[in-house]
Image (cartoon, rainbow, N blue to C red):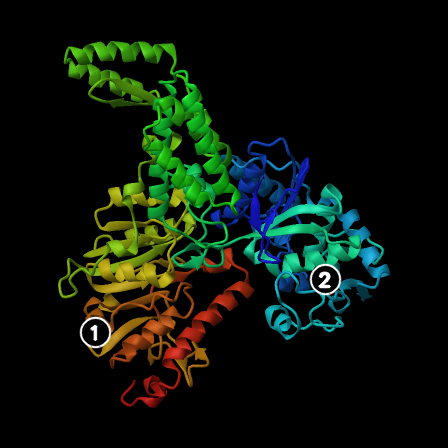
Amino acid sequence: MLKIKDSMTGDLKSVISDNQTQVKIYTCGPTVYRSAHLGNMRTYLMADWIRRVISLDSNIKIFHVKNITDVGHMRQERLELGEDRIISAAINENKTASEIADFYTSEFFRDEKKLNIIPAEFFPKATENINEMIEIIEKLLVDGFAYKVLGNIYYNVDKWKDYGILSGNNGSDLLEAVRIKKDLNKLDPRDFTLWKKAEKGRTLKWKSPWGEGFPGWHIECSAMSIKYLGKSIDIHTGGVDNLFPHHEDEIAQSDAFNGVKTVKTWVHGQHLLWDGVKMSKSEMNDLTVSDLENKGFDPIAFRYLCLTSRYYNRLHFSISSIKSAQNALKKIRQKVWIWSENLVNKSSADQILIKNYKLKFHQFVSDNLNLPLAVSHMWAVVHSDLSDSNKFELLLYFDKVFGLGLDSISKNKIDQEINSKMSLRSDLRLNQNYSSTDKIRSDIAGKGYLIEDTSKKSRIRPLMNWESPEKKFLDCLKSPKDFAFLPLNESEFEITVGLIARNDLADITRFVSGFLNTLKFKNSELLIVNNSTNVYVHSYLANLNKDYQNVRVIHLDHNYGEATAKNIILKQSRGEILILMDVSTEVIGDIFTPIKNILSDEKIGVCGIDGLTSDDFRHFHEDNNKGLFVDAMQAYCFAFRRNILLDVGLMRENFRFYRNLDLDFSLQIKNLGYKIFSFDMLPLNKHEHWVFQEYSSERVDELSKKNYKRFLKKWDGRNDLLVKNQKNQI
């Protein structure tokens, strides 16, 4: 019987009582304004394993509800501002809100299928349950748990005495935790929105007793969970980020409406980390199931990787770890394939052995989902002295929980034509006719099969989709640790232009075209670090690398932070002068000659366009800085002699976002006595910066402020570095 840790009490609880015939599970599903990333999918895998363990050796009926949030506000502060992410995504992609929601909903279903997640019994959509939300809000108003102000309905937190029972956030702690601007309509800053009055021109809105508007984030899950599962829910799952405020507010709403405790057990999955940082779109380190496939990985390898860590622990993801998971998955599939060909009848003694192994497995998975120990148990069986038939039976039993799809491996049959060719090849091999056997091997491989020769026999199995030739570019993917400094006092080119490639192919092709049209005949190289997860960008850059001798591309295994990616350029460039450029710029003429002339003065460390000055490091100004010495150079065009890196060193890699990294590196160079010169003109065009195509202005400001704090922590008070305080500047 499964026991699992209740997030509310911290205790292990049995999720099934005696004589219970059904279990009701509610999972907070996706908000369908963009692709779900692997961190999101880890939480859905946790819920899948819970239901699989409950179903193991039992006839208990599972009723699982996983909502689809197609009204897109997902954080309280965004709701207070009236923002809807579905609408925002629709505007950005020139589609209707329903088209956006339908597209990403379908993608989510495909991703769950690729990960072999058992579909929930119900996938209710928020937009199809507005009446149920209104019904709950009306009762909360009548019972005194909510109040109305100017068409908005708020939950009165002060009326719910158990507020904070799940998260521990209450009182003064709660005020610190809620990240919203003060709403003067609220009686208490802790109160949250149940219904928001629609602003003029809003597209997603519904009629209500309080006028046209739209629901709050938390009321959606209360309404759908109660409608489909009733007033008593056995298990409610979600990610740890949902714990507060979302699930805390759900409890306040649902329990006040039902008059009883609605959820018996709360279960939360921890973060997936990449580069030590939570995987998320905002950190620019997110990876989707499709991205994983495009890098040559089977999505089930990610499922296997998640099996190796407890759901309540953070899991560190890396390309190395997913490679290891895929190799382990390949080994176990090969074993199952081999064993499936050697099935024999088992004795009663075998049955006792099998029963004991199953019992041990059941103990592991029932102990708060101790899946890592269960995986170790599986490998112990693989390496044991049990017969192939016993191993085969046990692994298929284990896989009822693991969900690795091992039963489908044994069902793959080889058609008669291929078997005939294999028989012919075996005869030729016995006669040592190796040229003919190799020809048959190639022919069979071309039909999607893999032949494995041993000393006794040859085996054949279907190729996995990630083993196909077009997926074999994994070996070209690198990580920053693969790169050391090239000699800084030796140069193969006069100039290196360094570029970070991102996901926008149009920006990259425009920049490359400008470089090739203006600089390809000079003694120069274009060094591109591919920091993109876009398979089309990868393909374009791979071809570019082959077609042009003075273009070199370094493909990273995933999207690293800005400073980390640029440090690879600093280490690997081979030009006497290095010009770091942004993909939003376009070279339209000879930028090299004026840069080379200025940098011939060894007192000048950096030159470029749009330099900045400051009076106090609090504000930087671009106006009237052309043709002058400045305090910092912006990253659009940042040129310096490569040998100064001997003293300057690398960029600080805690700058994951690009903003203010250029200021920091400028001061790093000025701190060694160098000057920074800003041209009045260079033959460059500047286009819309990529970051404003991918992020809201609020998110850009938030990330910029984090970097600015890092900048100030190091340089605040160093007014001696400012141009206005230095003599002999022109």
Q: Earlier in the sequence, mark 1 or mark 2?
A: 2
Which quadrant holds residue 563? bottom left
Instruction: Quickly name the residue at label 2.
Output: 193
User: Residue at image x 17%, y 12%?
Assistant: 430
Q: Nearer the viewer, residue 712 or 510?
A: 712
User: Residue at image x 73%, y 41%?
Assistant: 228
Instruction: Quickly name the residue at label 1.
Output: 647
Q: Are marks 1 and 2 in contact (CB under 8 Å)?
A: no
Q: Quadrant of the C terminus?
A: bottom left
Q: Is residue 478 above or below residue 564?
A: above
Which quadrant holds residue 214? bottom right
Is the residue marked by circle 1 packed among few (<14), some (14-19), or many (20+) residues within 10 Å?
few
**Residue 200 seen in render:** no
Comparing labels 1 and 2, the label whose residue is closer to the camera: 2
Q: Is residue 648 above or below residue 54?
A: below
The answer to whether residue 259 is left or right of residue 106 is: right
**Residue 599 seen in render:** yes
The answer to whether residue 324 is left or right of residue 157 is: left
Q: Nearer the viewer, residue 181 or 397?
A: 397
Amino acid bearing label 2: Thr
Which quadrant holds residue 514? bottom left
Q: Quadrant of the N terminus?
A: top right
Q: What percent of the width, then of the height, locates residue 531? A: 36, 53
Q: Nearer the viewer, residue 657 or 267?
A: 267
Q: Is residue 524 above or below residue 390?
A: below
Q: What percent of the width, then of the height, locates residue 480? A: 29, 56
Amino acid bearing label 1: Asp
The answer to whether residue 107 is left or right of residue 144 is: left
Q: CA distance from mark 1 to mark 2?
A: 55 Å
Q: What percent of the width, then of the height, locates residue 237? A: 60, 49
